[in-house]
Image: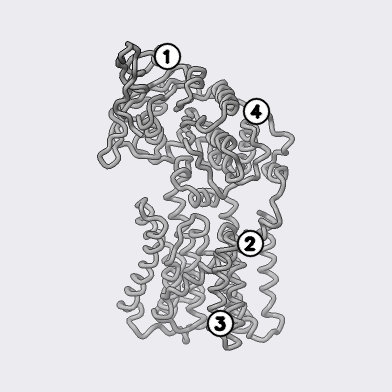
Amino acid sequence: MRRSLLLVLLAGALFAAVPYLSLPAYYESVLYLVFHWIALATSWNLLSGYSGYFSFGHGAFFGIGIYTTAVLASRFDVPFLWTLPAAALLAAVVGAALGAIAFRVKAVRGELFALLTLAATFVVATIVLNTPIDGGPGVYLSAVPMPEIGPTPSSSFYLLALAAAVLTIVVALLVYYARFGLGLFAIHDDEDVAEVMGVPTFRYKVGAFALSCALAGVVGGIHAMFVSYVTTGDTFTVTLPLTVILMSVLGGTRHWAGPAIGATVITLLLYSFTAGDSAVLGKAAMGVILVSVILFMPEGILGYLLKKLGRKPEAGRAAQAGLPLSAVPAEAPPEALPPASAGEVLLRASGVHKSFRGVQALRGVSLEVRRGEILGLLGPNGSGKSTFINVVSGHFPVSAGEIQFGGRQIAGIEAHHIARCGLSRTYQIPRPFAHLTVLDNVALPAMFGARQLDRAQAEREAWRWLAFTGLTGRARALPDELNLHQRKFLEFARALAAQPQLLMLDEVLSGLTPSEIDEAVALIRRIRSQGTTIVFVEHVMRAVMALCDRIVVFNQGEVLAEGVPAEVMTRPEVVSAYLGKPMADESGAPVFVAEGVHA
């Protein structure tokens, strides 16, 4: 990161020398537009590229910045440079307010969020047009004095645009490498899983939205002075967000430098066609470029180039984390548990209900999990086992009842707070973050879970758990490059990296071969030997009988039986729940009739 930051600052310093080279003002005007669009595209990417929430309302916050500067400078005689912080603040406040409302509604994702932000553009434009802010005739800034930043007025605008571009790129770079950035990328790939693993998704989305809007406001304030006359018709247009999206997608939204590359290419292309009296041809070329990128380079120019250049070897990332690959231990050292007596109740569920639009998935479930044990949850498909894990982990809210973990009431609190209490889980169908490497997938819960490690410490911890699960050699791979066995073990490593007191395993053996099941059983034993309490949902009976101290049998959302595995599995009601009720045929041999089977 330091090298990238130094390169950005060095490039900024070199471009800052352009006004002193006595070049024609034409070059400064062209570069002003390049930096203007770099700043807008990069600021848009902070929310939409990093978190995946595509915004079509970037023009609204750009326009708020324009009118904040225009009104303060022309009507209240506020010095131009002092209007820029006000433009950033007002745009950020409006963006944060909109985000605080939109992000509270889970249904407002994807296309709905894009349409909501597009509607915000027209709402802001209507307010500005029909109030004294504009009133119809527009706002003139021709009488506002321009500070002498450069040797000429055109160079002053150029230097301001350069400063805005460098600022936005530096912010994007710092966020990219920070905990904040990793959390946003996790939200992009699977927001629900990110929340369960400890990422405060609501706060991160609002923060990214506010930061994106603030930077757009600054760019708008500079541009207001540049055009010297602003109107709602020219400011609040759909063209601006579409152009910004094109630039970001072209360069690559998954990298901090991608939008800058895309903005440079598109701006120079459009300017060259416009200068040659071929503006229509330039727009057609933009369309062809966009279609080509979507079809042949979906990761953008920068993503394509990075993929062609290849990834650094695993040793490079291990060294970055401060831990040479050769020094990664074969097993992660056991962590000391908090002082507690073995056998004390760690998790207590009392009368837990969960319904989905009238369908009762859990009907008054009450059970206890004791510290240090492996508790098996068994039952037919649809009996409520996975729903119980989803409710305990916060993936689903509880409809009624109480859940206490370590003496603390966790029913009704947000999932990321539950994760930080020391509770972790796997998913029945592996749900890794598709665009994060295996190493980053495992480092994330170490950063956001109970221990809240910084990035370097989290990567060191991730290497240990990758070694523990036998995935060290795949650390730099993406999850799609793993087979099912490796993806299951990635679920183990990711859950363990949070150093949980309670680990909930949801059918981790499904789909594995007998030899892979044996490996997984041995791994679970090693996890338990380190003092971790385990809740084990599984259908593979030999694994259940070999691992579990106690089992609880679910049926139709209720607890049917609990106790020692060998004794519980012989009870008639349990046999009936699995195989149906026995009845004799003509020869007197028992025949099982299935009743109440749920798919």
Q: Is residue 467 left or right of residue 557?
A: right
User: Mark 4 belongs to which amino acid?
Assistant: Glu
Residue 37 or residue 543, whichever sits in front: 543
Q: Would you place residue 145 above or below residue 541 in this image?
A: below
Q: Residues within 10 Å of mark 3 (few under 14, many from 20)?
A: few
Q: Residue at x 30, y 14 (%)?
A: 586
Going from N to C along the chain, the mark reached first, 2 or 4, is: 2
User: How far across and how far down the image is residue 401, in percent?
Assistant: 29, 31
Residue 267, picture quadrant? bottom right
Q: Which numbered disc, 3 or 4, marks the residue closer to the eye? A: 3
The answer to whether residue 408 of the structure is visible from this angle is no
**3D distance between C-alphas at marks 2 and 3:** 25 Å
Q: Which residue is mark 3?
A: 281
Determine which residue is flagged by label 2. 302
Q: Which comes before the other along the chain, label 2 or label 3?
A: 3
User: Camera-side residue: 413 or 117?
Assistant: 117
The amino acid type of the residue labelled 1 equals Val
Can residue 81 be seen in this snapshot?
yes
What percent of the width, then of the height, locates residue 418? 43, 36
Foreground tag (1 vs 4): 1
* Label 1 – label 4 distance at C-alpha: 31 Å
Determine crowd level at label 1: few under 14, some 14-19, many 20+ residues with C-alpha closer than 10 A: some
Nearest the viewer among 398 and 94 is: 398
Most extreme residue toward the left, as rendered? 358
Element marked by disc 2? helix
In the picture, which quadrant includes the N terminus?
bottom right
| 3D distance between C-alphas at marks 1 and 2 | 58 Å
| Residue for badge 1 | 564
Tag in front: 2 or 3: 3
